[in-house]
């Protein structure tokens, strides 16, 4: 129904009891139409086109199994971070600290494993546990400061970004730790199952699947959308918004901790200086995948697709012999286009003007409500 | 109806914000199955009174009596547990969620057994229940799948009211429910209010619109400067009398 012209049959001045029945339509939009309108689906088409172009330009070097495997493996750790970031951004928050938390957690894990000694699974598992718990702790700190102290997420996570990185450097005196249990590097970092599938990618796939179930299937996910959509309304119906936000940032931190130890396993170093762009790359992927920075909208599937666009571009440019720096240019353009599409969509949904303020203040209620329809029929 | 006992009653509620006295010993009462209009000029304390009775505001002194028992309604959850719901002026729906998700927000039906404990919801039964709730009110809801943010003001109003009514088995507060609506949607809402009351639920209707008040209410209670200054049976009063009581030209306690 469009803005100002109510259809005559539903607007009878004195409604009868039956009116509701006629007004209810179950499947007003067929499933395929809803899928087509999903930003995640549109971006998937973009990805397929990109892949097709590279496959045509370099049929032998690009379109082969080992290259595909390479791309997937490189995207795996980012995908784990992307799952957490999707939750965060759906609540209309942001988490800039993930790269630093990764590094810090990796340092803690490396230090612990060195102290324990040994190259076996026992040491490795304790290291993994320590890294995940360290990430969780940072995430809970973020969540507490955002939900209870009411400091904007942008500032809180900018602060912890610096703190976690600084502390990691203090602990290591700025020198990367390169001692990692052998079993961890062999079995996790370079390990494969079924001969060809990297263990890292399997772990990422499990995290993605769990994230999808949690976000799209459970009450926890529903509350995540509700908090991002209209925090005040969630609060009024008894959703414990503060506790929920703390859990969301804790989840993001926990996944950053997991990513930190996986990165340690993959590269055999704490790579202290290696994650400065990670937060922005993950945020870009989440946003390209159709998750709205204004909250209330988003999918894990979109995030995964959004991750592959930069990954494929990077790989493809190298293979076809274009300077790989073009990847940054292309990804930047895709990012802006994705947010523009989101803006247009939101504006048409709310029938108001698109807002230009990113990261709205947490205290405001729905930006959409105000401008829409004081229509006197 | 006059001899029915009040389901919800406030006695001498007082609330100060710094030097401003928003409620100054305000009384209020509403009986099952009746529509009480709560009127008063801007700043008379209508919204403050509703917030106090719906668990959104603490009072400095005074009593709230629910079904003959003195209660402390200190949170919206407490109010909900008693069967008291509020439709706020800004509706307080989550625009990205659909009508069913909004209706059950915070009160989701979980799947039985282990799945429910793991956080999985019974979407099918919620949808069925929501549909029958909308039907019962004759609410015009365009789609159960579309986000409510994409719907018109009238539809969202219908959803907000249906949600409140679905959960309220005792008292519904409607804060200016017709303020943002056109003529037809307003007629719809007023019709809905009568229908809710006919199910035995007490409805408290806050409005600036005297014609709406006259049309829909059984009794009118007038607030002025934080006090209830007059109570009328709607059939025994006139708009002129109500306006006079609101502005302080007259003041009596009747009915």
Image (cartoon, grey):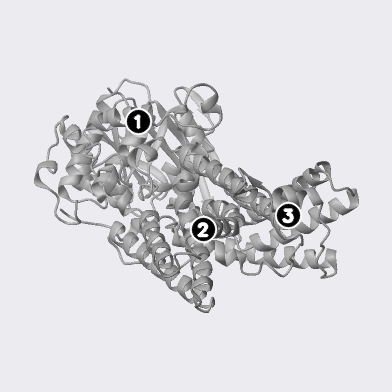
Q: Are marks 3 and 1 in contact (CB under 8 Å)?
A: no
Q: Secondary structure at mark 1?
A: helix
Which image quarter: residue B200?
top left
Disc 3 sits on a residue from what chain?
A
Residue A31 falls left or right of residue B45: left
Q: Quadrant of residue B131?
A: top left
**In the picture shown, does residue A220 fall above or below A355?**
above
Front in this rendered view, residue A89 or B1: A89
* Distance in Å between CA atoms under marks 1 and 2: 29 Å
Give the residue drawn at x 37%, y 54%: A41
> Where is mark 1, residue-wise?
B166
Discs 2 and 3 share one subunit: yes
Q: Which residue is label 2 attached to? A: A362
Mark 3 vs mark 1, CA separation in Å: 54 Å
Q: Nearer the viewer, residue A332 or B237?
A: A332
**Mark 2: few/some/many CA within 10 Å (<14, 14-19, 20+):** some
Q: Which residue is mark 3?
A: A265
């Amino acid at each position: 129904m469009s803005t100002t012209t109510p259809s005559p049959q539903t607007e009878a001045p004195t409604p009868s009891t039956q009116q509701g029945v006629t007004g209810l339509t179950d499947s007003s939009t067929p499933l395929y139409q809803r899928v087509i309108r999903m930003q995640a689906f549109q971006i998937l088409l973009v990805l397929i086109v990109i892949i097709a172009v590279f496959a045509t330009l370099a049929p032998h070097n690009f379109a082969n199994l080992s290259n595909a495997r390479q791309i997937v493996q490189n995207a795996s750790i980012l995908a784990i971070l992307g799952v957490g970031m999707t939750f965060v951004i759906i609540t209309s928050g942001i988490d800039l600290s993930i790269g630093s938390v990764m590094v810090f957690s990796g340092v803690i894990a490396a230090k612990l494993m060195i102290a324990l000694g040994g190259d076996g699974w026992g040491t490795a598992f304790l290291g993994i546990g320590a890294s995940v718990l360290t990430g969780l702790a940072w995430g809970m700190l973020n969540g507490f400061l955002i939900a209870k102290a009411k400091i904007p997420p942008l500032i809180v996570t900018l602060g912890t970004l610096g703190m976690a990185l600084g502390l990691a450097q203090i602990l290591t005196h700025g020198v990367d730790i390169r001692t990692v249990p052998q079993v961890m590097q062999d079995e996790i970092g370079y390990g494969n199952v079924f001969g060809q599938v990297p263990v890292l990618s399997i772990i990422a796939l499990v995290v993605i699947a769990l994230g999808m179930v949690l976000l799209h299937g459970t009450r926890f996910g529903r509350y995540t959308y509700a908090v991002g959509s209209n925090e005040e309304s969630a609060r009024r119906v008894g959703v414990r918004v503060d506790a929920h936000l703390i859990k969301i940032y804790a989840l993001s931190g926990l996944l950053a901790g997991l990513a930190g130890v996986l990165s340690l396993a993959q590269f055999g170093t704490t790579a202290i200086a290696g994650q400065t762009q990670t937060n922005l790359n993950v945020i870009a992927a989440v946003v390209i995948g159709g998750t709205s920075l204004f909250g209330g909208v988003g999918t894990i599937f979109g995030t995964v697709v959004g991750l592959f666009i930069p990954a494929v571009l990077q790989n493809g440019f190298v293979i076809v012999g274009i300077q790989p720096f073009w990847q940054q240019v292309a990804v930047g353009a895709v990012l802006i286009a994705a947010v523009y599409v989101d803006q247009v969509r939101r504006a048409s949904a709310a029938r108001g003007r698109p807002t230009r303020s990113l990261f709205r203040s947490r205290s405001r209620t729905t930006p959409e409500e105000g401008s829409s329809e004081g229509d006197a029929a | 109806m006059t001899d029915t006992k009040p389901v919800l009653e406030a006695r001498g509620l007082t609330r100060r914000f710094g030097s401003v006295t928003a409620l100054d010993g305000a009384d209020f009462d509403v009986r099952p199955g009746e529509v009480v209009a709560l009127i008063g000029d801007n700043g008379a304390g209508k919204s403050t009174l509703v917030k106090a009775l719906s668990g959104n505001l603490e009072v400095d002194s005074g009593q709230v009596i629910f079904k003959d028992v003195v209660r402390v309604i200190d949170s919206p959850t407490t109010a909900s547990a008693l069967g008291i719901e509020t439709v706020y002026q800004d509706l307080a729906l989550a625009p990205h969620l659909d009508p069913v998700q909004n209706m059950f927000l915070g009160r989701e039906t979980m799947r039985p057994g282990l799945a429910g404990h793991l956080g999985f919801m019974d979407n099918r039964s919620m949808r069925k229940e929501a549909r029958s709730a909308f039907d019962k009110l004759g609410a015009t809801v365009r789609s159960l799948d579309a986000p409510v943010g994409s719907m018109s003001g009238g539809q969202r109003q219908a959803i907000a009211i249906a949600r409140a009514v679905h959960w309220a088995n005792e008292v519904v507060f409607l804060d200016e429910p017709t303020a943002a609506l056109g003529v037809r949607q307003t007629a719809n809402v007023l019709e809905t209010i009568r229908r809710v009351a006919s199910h035995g639920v007490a409805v408290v209707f806050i409005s600036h619109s005297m014609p709406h008040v006259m049309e829909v209410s059984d009794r009118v209670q007038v607030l002025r400067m934080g006090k209830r200054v007059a109570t009328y049976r709607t059939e025994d009063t006139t708009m002129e009398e109500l306006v006079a009581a609101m502005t302080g030209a007259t003041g009596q306690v009747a009915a």
